[in-house]
Image: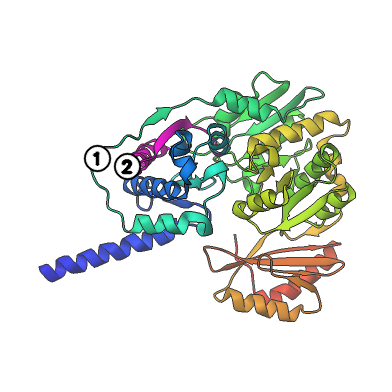
Amino acid sequence: MLIQFIAGLFTRKGTEVDNLDRIFKAYDIRGVYPTEVNEDIAWKIGFATGQFLRSLLRGYDRGQKAANRLIVGRDMRPHSESLTKNLIEGVLASGLSCVDLGMCDTPMVYFAINHLGTCGGVQVTASHNPIEYNGFKIAGQKARPVGEDTGLKEIKHIVSVLRRTPAGETSATVEQVDLWNEYRQHVLQFLKLARPLKVVVDASNGMAGKMMPAVFDGTDLEIIPLNYEFGGGFAHPPNPLVEANLKQVCSVVKRRKVDFGICFDGDADRCMFVDEKGNIVRCDYITALLARHFLTLYPGATIVYDVRSSRVVPEEIQAAGGVPRRERVGHAFMKKAMADARGIFGGELSGHFYFRDNFNADSGAIVFAVVASIVSSQSAPLSELVAPFKRYVQSGEINFRVQDKDAMINELAEKFSDGRQDRLDGLTVEYDDWWFNVRPSNTEPLLRLNLEAVNENLLMEKLQEVKSVLGEPVKE
């Protein structure tokens, strides 16, 4: 019996470690509820996050009330309220006080961290994942991202050795705070409408359903709402990067004859735009459009973009007198690049858009406001504004299952050794009339390919050359 008991302890410990390896990702924590993410894990993550963020506070900060508080928000998932309650209990047990924003979009957490000057924040959300998932996005002071290399490893270690204990004596407190009015004022600084607009907004049954009316009601935007309701699951998966999930907003845009449409993800930090004809607008085209806009306001400024973006982006930045800065994929790298280069704006192909005047953080609400401002100031519709950017053809992101990712990248580098190469993020190889980037997935045995060429024939030809090394792509 003793041997069986000891063996059971080791089995449970191994199972817990395996579970942590599954749910701790490169930039956040996510898993299926309740088998992978549950109330016990939430408490431990709250305690570990509080302990980690407290360790970062310098001497002069420790005495400040604001710096010893943590922002907590949550999305609309049915298990988010219970997870948040347990997360807060863990944070309080670590000695940090909590500011509970209630149900809100993730960018509001970033705003609150800076507005109140706290040591960081946590949003309980699984973003674009299906309804059975949940998780945690963690940020530090000034909303700096806490990722694998900036704190998540440390938090994971604390969680791995932690056992939940009864609440003891603590001076830490929790306070419910309503910041919607302040958040609205902050976002509306970016909205400068020259004329009224009519737009379709698909909230994907996510947090944009609360954020949009709270922020934009009472402006000169006539909004046709889609999927604003909570509690009944998702009308379509809350991932706007999947074309099938945009069918509804595209259809309504064409039928209602509006200026443009937008579709948000579950926590409203990412979005995709649809022009007045119901055609999807690539996010790097939106980056190019906004780069022009910001460079008229801030001549010579730096604009940050990710390695997957079209050549159109740096070309448009340079043509407008700006400084293009190419960066690794991921919000941790984009935000750091924004800060290091004092960039005015940044955009990723994934639908994240970053703003200097939003603490270098991403915001779906703000990019919506800026695009609306640009469209309202022009006589041409959105389709014509982005038409000049369509001078190359793209493959889109294609995934290949590869066991030894480093070896495969080296093989590609050797095959295309006559091209200009860099290893900023995976491998990028450039030629005058085409280029490609291959990046390893952080969590799966996959390489992700993006290829661009000057015409369709060259695109297909070069895709075959690259596939001769990578093999056949994964079927979606």
Question: What's the magenta region?
Answer: 77-106
The residue singled out by tag 2 in the image is 93
Q: In this figure, what is the number of numbered marks?
A: 2
Observer-nearest residue: 307 or 66? 66
Q: Is residue 460 above or below residue 315?
A: below
Do we see residue 178 in this rendering?
Answer: yes
What element does badge 2 sit on? Answer: helix
Residue 103 part of the magenta-drawn span:
yes
Count residues near mark 1 (Cα–Cα under 10 Å), then give few for <14, some for 14-19, many for 20+: few
What element does badge 1 sit on? Answer: loop
Q: Would you say the residues marked 1 and 2 are in contact, meaning their CB atoms lie under 8 Å apart? A: yes
Residue 1 falls left or right of residue 120: left
Instruction: Residue at the far top: name it.
Output: 218
Q: Quadrant of the N terminus?
A: bottom left
Residue 368 falls left or right of residue 276: left
Relative image position of residue 476 (x, y in whole percent):
59, 59
Q: Is residue 203 above or below residue 456?
A: above
Instruction: Residue at the far front: name it.
Output: 60
N-terminal of the pair, mark 1 or mark 2, is 2
Q: Amino acid at mark 2?
A: Ala
Q: Amino acid at mark 1?
A: Gly
Observer-nearest residue: 384 or 345? 345
The residue singled out by tag 1 in the image is 168
Count residues near mark 2 (Cα–Cα under 10 Å), then give few for <14, some for 14-19, many for 20+: many
Relative image position of residue 461 (x, y in whole percent):
80, 71
Do we see residue 348 in this rendering?
Answer: no
